[in-house]
Image (cartoon, grey):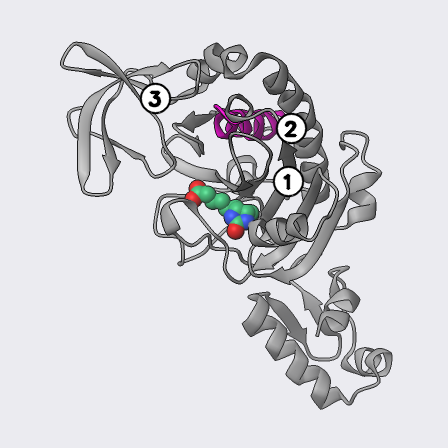
Amino acid sequence: MLKLLSLLRDGRFHSGEDLGTALGISRSAVWKQLQNLESELNLTIYKVRGRGYKLSEPLHLLDAQVILSDASHAPWPVFVHEEIDSTNAEGLRMAAQGQPTPFVVLAERQSAGRGRRGRQWISPFAENLYYSAVLRIEGGMRQLEGLSLVVGLVVMRVLSNLNVKHVGLKWPNDVLVADRKVAGILLELVGDPADVCHVVLGIGVNVNMQSTDQVDQPWTSMRCETGALVDRNHLVAMLSGELERELKRHQTHGFAAFQVEWEQAHLWQGRSVSLIAGASRVDGVVKGVDVHGGLRLDIDGKEKSFSGGELSLRLRDDS
Ligand code: BTN
């Protein structure tokens, strides 16, 4: 099926006969495979009598060679999968099997994409970016403090450099345009966080997706915001390049070096919020973040900091 897709990826018409000859199958088998492509990969294929078949638009697949030859790219090896359960899960498996770090895992689609707080990350074929960078951390807890916020800042900056306007952050690491999510970040860790561990920086970006009925929160994509098709290979190269630079800065100076810039990008500064952890909830006004990346809230005139991966932030009605 993917061989057929690679014949069609130029977005031009191909006759059923030519496709069948190239694949060594009958025209009716071509027809069957085309139907599978449409239903399984959610692609639109035009069928015109006398001309043949074409994709509704050219398909640009992820390509490790193209990424590595992009001037923006960090010298990190890239592993591309057509389909995987989760790029984070694969990154952790590869690290456990001794793959030297850092490295990047990408997929055209995920069958079990993981989001924060046990949620699913919807991962349609070839439309978005599912990116996991795996690092080895040797410096103990300090190297992890605020790391996920730094990743959010990097993603925001890259999107903004690629013409997405009004992109900002919501603590701890949602990347939003106004109140719609354009990217999410999930850090996962194995080993001893106080000593040596592997951390996977999982980044999901809504890139060229224009419609879906599967996402249960307000969302947008780079394409919806800019009106233009985005080159995902270049996006990967930019992300890795910017991550490499900023992770070095984080390693040397800690989150304190990012605190001011992070607060400037925070869309919910000064807003009245509820901070939710399971069944418990705290109401306050957002003051900013502390030097460790914790959220600073004003609660009845007293400032308190909060941190932890399971926390989520909601706007209060009176905000
Ligand atoms: C969130 O809930 O906001 C975090 C979403 C993180 C999704 C990305 S997609 C690439 C990587 N692999 C996963 O399974 N999850 C992360």
Amino acid carrying mark 2 in the image: Leu
For mark 1, give the secondary structure. Answer: strand
Q: Tell me residue 201's x, y (percent).
A: 57, 38
For mark 3, give the secondary structure. Answer: strand
Give above or below for 2 relative to 197: below
Amino acid carrying mark 1 in the image: Ala
Numbered tag placed on residue 133 in the rendering? 1
Query: What range of the chain is rendered magenta?
Result: 144-162
Q: Tell me residue 274's x, y (percent).
A: 21, 30
Kindly tell me whether residue 209 is visible in this rendering.
no
Residue bearing the label numbered 3: 295
Amino acid carrying mark 3 in the image: Leu
Q: Of the residues under marks 1 and 3, which one precedes in the sequence?
A: 1
Numbered tag placed on residue 243 in the rendering? 2
Give above or below for 249 relative to 97: above
The answer to whether the residue labelled 2 contacts the one labelled 1, judged by CB atoms less than 8 Å apart, is yes
Q: Quadrant of the N terminus?
A: bottom right
Is residue 179 inside the magenta stretch?
no
Q: Tell me residue 306's x, y (percent).
A: 31, 24
Instruction: Sort mark 3 into few (<14), some (14-19) or many (20+) by Cα contacts within 10 Å.
Output: many
